[in-house]
Amino acid sequence: MPTEKASERDITLMDRVMREARSALAYGGAGVAALLASPDQIIGVAHNTIQETGDLTNHAEMVLLHGVSRELQEMDAQDRHALTLYVTLEPCLMCSAALSFVGLKRIVYAALAEDANIEEMIVYNLTLPKINQQLVRGPFTLVPGVRRTEGQDLLRRMNKAADAPANLKT
């Protein structure tokens, strides 16, 4: 599985997406956010909108992809391959499939799937690193655990952490 260490830019952009997640959480939304960047600019930022819309597929990555769909459509494959997704929680199977379909090749994420409680998981032990090599459009380069402690804290604040009781309300 291709993995990389985080660069200074990765850390800076992860800090930016963490601010988005904390802001969404402060306003009663979910504290999961995503940011899409080219090598020289931020293309878009979004957060999970399930609570606001009632649409259970409105994960941060999906909201972001919908928001930047026109820009993505105008890019050629090589430009899409140069993009990096930054997200506060390891992408689930649905989001991973969508990101692969779009042609992204690099994902930087904070909290790992194992950091979330069972209600947040879709399939036991089937994480992005485990399916990465099976993706038909080629594996992602993964940069896991960037600002992981902060990602875990967001999960705890949403009562979605692996150690948080499912019935606990804040």
Image (spheres, grey):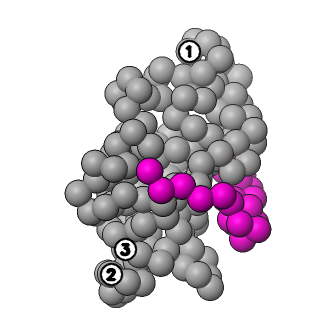
Task: Look at discs 1 and 2 and give the one toward the viewer.
Answer: 2
Give the residue pinned by disc 1. 166
Question: Who is closer to the viewer here, 138 or 21?
Answer: 138
Q: Where is the C terminus found, in terms of image quarters?
A: top right
Give SS at disc 2. helix
Q: Earlier in the sequence, mark 3 or mark 1?
A: 3
Vertically, is 106 above or below 94?
A: below
Q: Which residue has dot 3 on it?
A: 69
Q: Main secondary structure of the magenta part?
A: helix
How crowded is the residue under tag 3: few (<14 C-alpha within 10 Å), some, or many (20+)? few
Find numbered disc 3 in the image and state the secondary structure of the residue it sits on.
Answer: helix
- Residue placed at 42% from the left, 43% from the top? 128
Q: Residue at x 31, y 61 (%)?
A: 138
SS under mark 1: loop
Horizontal and vertical percent for residue 91? Answer: 46, 46
Q: Which residues are magenta?
A: 1-26
Asked if 84 appears above or below 21 in the picture, the reply is below
- Residue 39, image quadrant: bottom right
- Tell us which disc is closer to us: 2 or 3: 2
Residue type pointed to by label 2: Ala
